[in-house]
Amino acid sequence: MRTLLALVEDKPGVLNRTASLFRRRAFNIESLTVGHTEQPGVSRMTIVVDSKKTDANKVAQNLYKLVNVIKVEDITERPCVMRDLALIKVKANGGGSRSEVLQIVDTFRARVVDVSPDTLMIEVTGTEDKIDGLVEVLRPYGIIELVRTGRVAMVRGSGNGK
Amino acid sequence: MKRTGAQIVWKMLGREGADVAFGIPGGAIMHMYHPRQDYKVHHILMRHEQCAAHAADGYARVSGKVGVAIATSGPGATNLVTGIATAMMDSSPIVCITGQVPTQVIGTDAFQETDITGITLPITKHNYLVTDVDDLAYTIHEAFYVARSGRPGPVLIDLPKDVQIAETDFVPPKDGIEMPGYHPAGPGDLDLVQKAAEIINAAQRPVILAGHGVMMSGAMDALRAFVEKTSTPVSWTLLGKGAFPESHPLAGAMMGMHGEAFANHAIQEADLLLAFGMRFSDRVTGKLDCYAPKARKIHVDLDAAELNKRVQADVAILGDLRQVLEQLLPLVEKTPHSEWLAQIDEWRKDSHDRDIVNRPNDEYLVAPQFIDAICEATEGKAILVTDVGQHQMWAAQYYHSDQSNYFITSGGLGTMGFGLPAAIGAQAAQPDREVWAIVGDGGFQMTMQDLATLVQENLPVKVALSNNSYLGMVRQWQELFYDKRYEATDLWANPDFVKLVEAYGIRAWRATNLKEAIKAIEEARAHPGPAVVEFQIIKEGDEGNVYPMVAANRALDDMIRRPVSSDEPHLYE
């Protein structure tokens, strides 16, 4: 897996242009997140590609063909913090299951953000591996709904990635 | 002073250097057309929007300026699509302006509404939907800049009707461009240039592959200086025709699927390929696994995405070709390469002996004969615009010239119907030049309605219609690879082209042998207005096919050669 950061101008259609590029060049994208940055008018994308299927370098070169793309960087080899966030709604009614789930949540340093008589909604942040692990452990209890943001990443140290 | 969006468009087109625009009005663009007469830009009314885009493309390719095409919303805009895709594949700078339904009704399936920015997103270098008249002047300025800078390409501006009507204080945009992410490449990285020079100086059998980028970056003189200093032979891609003077002793020929055998042999035997402003298209390389197996590769291009895309380069230099060549020139050594050049000349002699124009006949006409005759008559000084198919390859093989930016053809997309409208654009850009459109009977019938545009503008384009009553290139493939089943390629219902052309009020001639061809060419040239010469050429057999030919998935030197005589077996053994 390679992780690319792309700083793009926050203009209408930029996400569409990016997605269209990935589709027409047959790039296989594992995850794509986009959001605002500290700088008005600039959005930041975190793009994860499976390097076995798609050459990350080609992705970067083609992104530069889009005139709204300001900078692309492959940060895979750099020391960085990578995080994924998941919300998981899991069955946890009376009996022993609720307390078991709460124990698991504690172990994974996740937190419960909503409670209903029969379910718990759990928020967890971490690497994809950690979240995969939590999902596997919760699966036997019955996962009702699951949503993940995809990877966001930031290089460690004092630079701002530009 | 308040100006409407419509007025701002014409004002800005003039400021950006457009003296001609090609288009067709319609409901959503009428308002923009309304003030046109008050401005200097000449408008040429086409007969199909596809032709407007091709004409803008032809205009751009011969003039080096940005071509402008205008269409209304919906069907007008979608008709542009083929022309835009053509310009995209061949890196041609055009700006298309389309009318759009008013902003208030966008997204409601209004009459003649279509999402043209969405549709053209993958086939434009960039596109814009202008929703505020205050953004209009700068958007046009930026659009022209994006179209012509870096690797040029088509840009589309979608202009809703209410924005054309809205008024604002017109403030001319400042010269600069505010695009934080858009920086066209300049000179190459010096370390890489140094590394390239070392490889060049060590090479024994180098070949230059000159592409469209040579002309795009204005590197013709720099290339020539490099070639003469290093005695490196030059071959070119289809779009690279014109990058290097063909009469030069170091000029090779077109390479690739229908390239000259000696040029392809040289590539396969070379120990160094210098790929200058070209992109190793599949039509150029043949089977990739066995492409130039003995050669190291140095690739210079200003589009990073082209480097190491199909062919892995030993040195890949991102940069503007002219600047990179100027960096290289002092670092490369004079090398005679005498043995290598002698070897290429030997191969060249063989190609020459097989050449179809060296087999004279009077009974029937073969296409190379009439193209050769046009070349003779015009002394290689005409602007040549082709359509797509067999005649296109023959034109590339048989029209020899020392000019640049004169061979206008749809290379990447291979768009049939390109020839006539692109010739209209070329002639509009260069009214005093002699423009020949070489077209086939198949492609001609895709856009021939624009004969009317020739009459209306009195553009003296000479059309050479190569008529074999077939979709000839497809027929050739059917003959060679599909058991001679001529499925859906026989154009037996063709009209009488001379009558048809005359119905437009255009002079027309018909030629069925070389003598008639030479006479008709002479008369067509002497005629002051537009003219069409129909050349009825041989339909089938060796002389009806384009050779040499590298069939699909064959190595570049595994060619079907031109036959020496009709008895010689020339197909694959």
Image: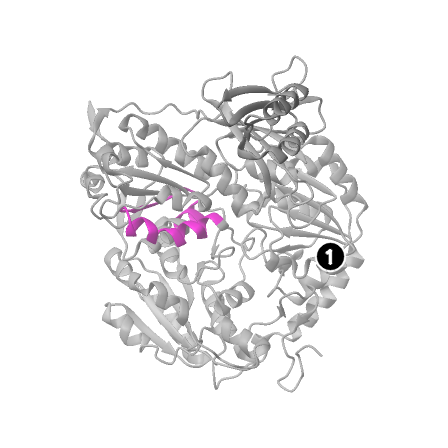
**Residue at the spot of label 1:** B292
Residue at 35 percent across and 44 percent down: it is B116
Q: Dot 1, how many residues are within 10 Å of its Cα: few (below 14), some (14-19), or many (20+)?
A: many
Residue at 67 percent across and 38 percent down: it is B317
Residue stretch in magenta: B59-88
Tell me if residue B82 comes above or below residue B16 in the rendering. Answer: below
- Which secondary structure, mark 1? loop
**x and y, in percent, of residue B507 in the image:** 28, 70
Residue B485 left/right relative to B137: right
Please say whether residue B237 is visible from this viewpoint.
yes
**x and y, in percent, of residue B103 in the image:** 26, 35
Tell me if residue A162 comes above or below residue A134 in the rendering. Answer: above
Residue B445 left/right relative to B513: left
**x and y, in percent, of residue B141 in the image:** 37, 31
Q: Quick one: A55 or B497, which is closer to the camera?
A: A55
Position of the N terminus of chain B by quadrant: top left
Please say whether residue B325 is visible from this viewpoint.
no
Q: Quick one: A103 or B506, which is closer to the camera?
A: A103
Q: Is residue B83 magenta?
A: yes
**x and y, in percent, of residue B92 in the image:** 46, 46
